[in-house]
Amino acid sequence: AAWKHVVATLDDALEYSREIGAFRPGAAALLKGAAEDRWTLTIASGGFGFYIRELLGPNLRAVSRLIHNELTFEPHGTTLHFNNEGFESPHFGGCKGKVIAHVLATETAPVVFCGDGRSDGGAVAYADHPRVSLFAVPGRELAERCKATAAAYSPFETFDSVIATLNVD
């Protein structure tokens, strides 16, 4: 999809992402645990890879798989690319439920899913799976959807509370 009204250079977009981008508290510990092979970290985001990679910086090495959308910056606008082969969604760039299904099918470890937005709704279908723990930010769309469907979830504000449930020594 072409976004002719969004005219910027990649450098401008990276600078802006550094100005406004931030991870939730506890993200450094989550990334450190993944870098130490205490758990496998997949990031599935409806955001754009260029700024996710920029914000992760050297911590990108800790990420096993990064699923994201992308923008191509052109002189007369940007072009959106859904970079989620195998995880397509009719409403979003990637279906988080399909990501969970893939991880369940290819790995044996428990799956811990953390989300907050509308694009995380596919995860609700796995809330009662015995290997899945679903975490949602209180008051945000994913938590509200869990409440509306009586899906099991744990509220979280920081990744520290998520890490505490992993029980990994």
Image (tube, rainbow, N blue to C red):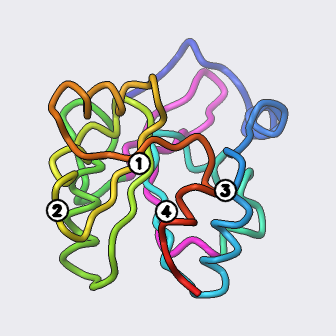
Judge depth for marks 2 and 4 and give the one in front.
2
Q: Contact, CB < 8 Å: mark 3 with mark 2?
A: no
* Magenta extent: 62-83
Image mark for residue 135:
1
Sequence-wise first label, 4 or 3: 3
Q: Contact, CB < 8 Å: mark 1 with mark 2?
A: no
Q: Tell me the kind of residue under disc 2.
A: His
- Image coordinates of residue 91 in percent, x first then y, are 24, 30
The residue beneath circle 3 is 53
Q: Contact, CB < 8 Å: mark 2 with mark 4?
A: no
User: Which residue corresponds to the image point at 36% horizontal and 32% vertical from the top-left?
Assistant: 143
The residue beneath circle 2 is 129
Give neighbour class at mark 4: few <14, some 14-19, many 20+ (Cα, 10 Å): some
Sequence-wise first label, 1 or 2: 2
Q: Tell me the kind of residue under disc 3.
A: Arg
Sequence-wise first label, 3 or 2: 3
Is residue 103 positioned above or below 19 on the image? below
The residue beneath circle 4 is 66
